[in-house]
Image (cartoon, rainbow, N blue to C red):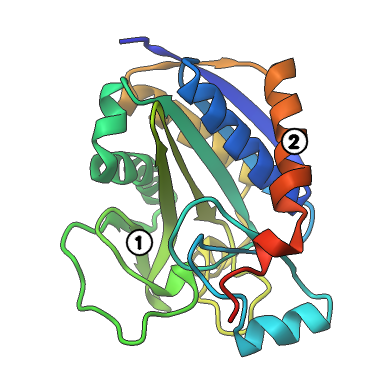
Amino acid sequence: MNRTWRLVVHGPSGPAWNMAVDEALLESATAGSGGTLRVYQWCRPTVSLGYFQSARQSQLETLLERNQVALVRRLTGGGAIVHHREWTYSLTLPSGHPLARQHQDLYARVHQCWAEVLRELGVAAWVVEQPPPKQEPEPFLCFLRRSPGDGVASGEHGTVKLAGSAQRRRRGGLLQHGSMLLGKPAWPQHPPGLAELLGREPDPQALLQDWLRRVESLFEVQLVPGQLTAEEKSAALRLLATRYLRPQWTLRQAG
């Protein structure tokens, strides 16, 4: 098994571009590339809808009308995520990689690394093991839902979710991407984030470097800094134009 993963770190980028790059990396993995861990942020507060979600939600429509958030649809399922004060990551692997066949374990291990970072800060954090009682109706927001493998923490605000991920599998490859919440995002009823639990703003860069070190240790890999290939950039531009900038994609399932 290849013990080297490419590490791609991107600064704040546009919503549609972020999703197009993640899918381009999935295409690259299905074509036989090795593992890639990408870490990135967003240029403005953005709601990413899960693959099957409707864009018809009163609070979302209000915030969109006020131009307070952007909107994009993910390739992966799950609840809506408000990307704002966070680190977002994506991990793409060819289907022959042993981790690609252990989807629940992959969630838990990525979030375990984040929980270890939080515990180093004095925050009580752990990974959910048992399925919680089912919520009816299921909350619109991902960070109001609970599933085995989620990363949660407790403090004066109670128990809150601070790490959540979703996957998409294709013949030949796996994409897992998710959010590690640094602070409460721009959404009125969103639960608090790490900043609220700490009572201060965390250092995003220090947390990222600590998390990356723990990923290397837990997964027994070496992260080698790299960039997108010319082919991946071309694929991202194609997906941007044919999928992620098109209202037909973003607003589908709305009826």
Q: Position of residue 217 (x, y in %)?
A: 35, 23
Residue of label 2: 238
| 170 in relation to 76, above or below | above
Q: Secondary structure at mark 2?
A: helix
Q: Residue at x 41, y 46 (%)?
A: 167
Q: Position of residue 187 (x, y in %)?
A: 64, 77
Nearer mark to the viewer, of 1 and 2: 2
Residue of label 1: 152
Q: Residue 255 is drawn in which quadrant?
A: bottom right
| 189 in relation to 74, above or below | below
Q: Earlier in the sequence, mark 1 or mark 2?
A: 1
Q: Residue at x 79, y 52 (%)?
A: 43
Three-letter amino acid code at the position of disc 1:
Val
Q: Position of residue 155 (x, y in %)?
A: 38, 71
Is residue 42 in view? no
Q: Is residue 60 left or right of residue 118?
A: right
* 3D distance between C-alphas at marks 1 and 2: 37 Å
